[in-house]
Every structure is written in structure tokens, then in C-alpha cells.
Amino acid sequence: MKKVSLFIAMSLDGYIADSKGSVSWLAGQGNDDDNIDSYSKFVNDIDTIIMGWNTYCQIVTELSPDEWVYHDFTTYVVTHNPKISSDKIHFTNESPVELVKKLREENGKGIWICGGANLIQQLVKKDVIDCYYITVIPTILGSGIRLFEKADHEIKLKLLKTQSYNGMTDLIYIKR
């Protein structure tokens, strides 16, 4: 069974985007003298990405408009906007929870929950995320799009690892 992992960054006060939906604040405090690349290590165990429509749009219009940066993976975009799928990018209006349940039964590597907040919150609510990779960015936004909203139940986690670099802290948790 494929492992489902959330890999995302948030501000110190728990936001994944500012009040305008921008992620331009996603940076450390200066030079990265440690040269730590947690992303490359993480994606070694991933072959599938799931994201929402807003995350997809932000990638193709703002973050990487000239190139699809996830060409090594099969990507599912959960959306109600009908769009034609390709070999590597599949647009679906399937429930994120049902999509994850179906994909985790397939052979292969793990599933990366890439964003956005609504999709993540649906998966957290149904407790289908196995591992949480959260990078805390040294910024307090004050408002914006929260990573976690009110939950109707508790999810207990076990801290596996922390590492700090460039003022940022990676927190890696699994369910316990």
C-alpha cells in the first residue's frame, strides 16, 4: 500500500499562503550555507502527486509558467473545472479522500499531497495522511490561508525528525 505524505511549508503562525493567496514569502532568513535539500530526498520515494486547482494554477501561472516542474511524476488535479488530461496530468472531480484511497492501492512509490488547503483539510478530517513533512518558514503572516482548520477529532502524531537550516525548520511526523 502506498504511503500518503503531506509535504508543505507554512509560516510560523500556521499559514500556507498570505491573504492574497501568494507564497512569495516562502524563503529562509538569508543565505543557505548548509545547502540542505529535503525536497530531493523526499521525492525519491514519490511517484504520484495530488493537488487542488488553485495550487495547479499557481504553479503554471506564477511559480513555473514556462515548464511543468513535476514531469517525473503522475499528477492528479482535483477540480470542478473541466480540463483535458494528459499522460502525466490528470484532472478529476473525484473526492480527494476517494482518490487517495484508490491510488494508495496501486503499485509504486508514495503519494505526495502537494496542496491546497481545502484538499488537505478534507484528507486530514478523514485521517488518510500517513506522514506530515512540514517546513516552518521564519515569517509571521498574521492572516491568510491556514494549513489546519478546526478538526472534529484529534490525530496523534509521533515526531520522527527535525532539521533546521537558513532559519527554517523541517518537522517530520507520522501517525502513532
Image: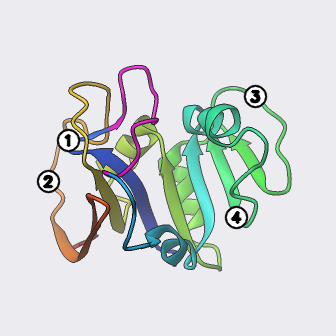
Tell whether label 4 touches label 3 (CB within 8 Å): no
Q: Amino acid at mark 1?
A: Ala
Residue beneath disc 1: 151
Left or right of 91: which side holds 152?
left
- Decide: few, some or many residues near mark 1? Use Cα within 10 Å; few <14, some 14-19, many ≥20: few
User: How far is disc 2 from disc 3 in space, using C-alphas?
Assistant: 35 Å
Q: Position of residue 69 (x, y in %)?
A: 70, 54
Tell whether label 2 touches label 4 (CB within 8 Å): no
Residue beneath disc 2: 154
- Decide: few, some or many residues near mark 2? Use Cα within 10 Å; few <14, some 14-19, many ≥20: few
- Decide: few, some or many residues near mark 4? Use Cα within 10 Å; few <14, some 14-19, many ≥20: some
Residue 176, can we see it? no
Tell whether label 1 touches label 3 (CB within 8 Å): no
Residue beneath disc 4: 73
Q: Is residue 63 magenta?
A: no
Of marks 4 and 1, which one's residue comes earlier in the chain? 4
Left or right of 89: which side holds 44?
left
Residue beneath disc 3: 82
Tell whether label 1 touches label 2 (CB within 8 Å): yes
Taking the spot 19% from the left edge, 36% from the top edge, the residue there is 150
Of marks 2 and 3, which one's residue comes earlier in the chain? 3
User: How far is disc 3 from disc 1 in space, using C-alphas?
Assistant: 30 Å
- Does dot 1 land on a helix, a strand or a loop? loop
Q: How many marks?
A: 4
Residue 129 to residue 89: above or below: below
Magenta residues span 16-29
**Front position in the image: 81 or 172:** 172
Residue 156, can we see it? yes
Q: Amino acid at mark 4?
A: Phe
What secondary structure do most residues of the magenta stretch adopt? loop
- Does dot 4 land on a helix, a strand or a loop? loop
**Front position in the image: 92 or 87:** 87
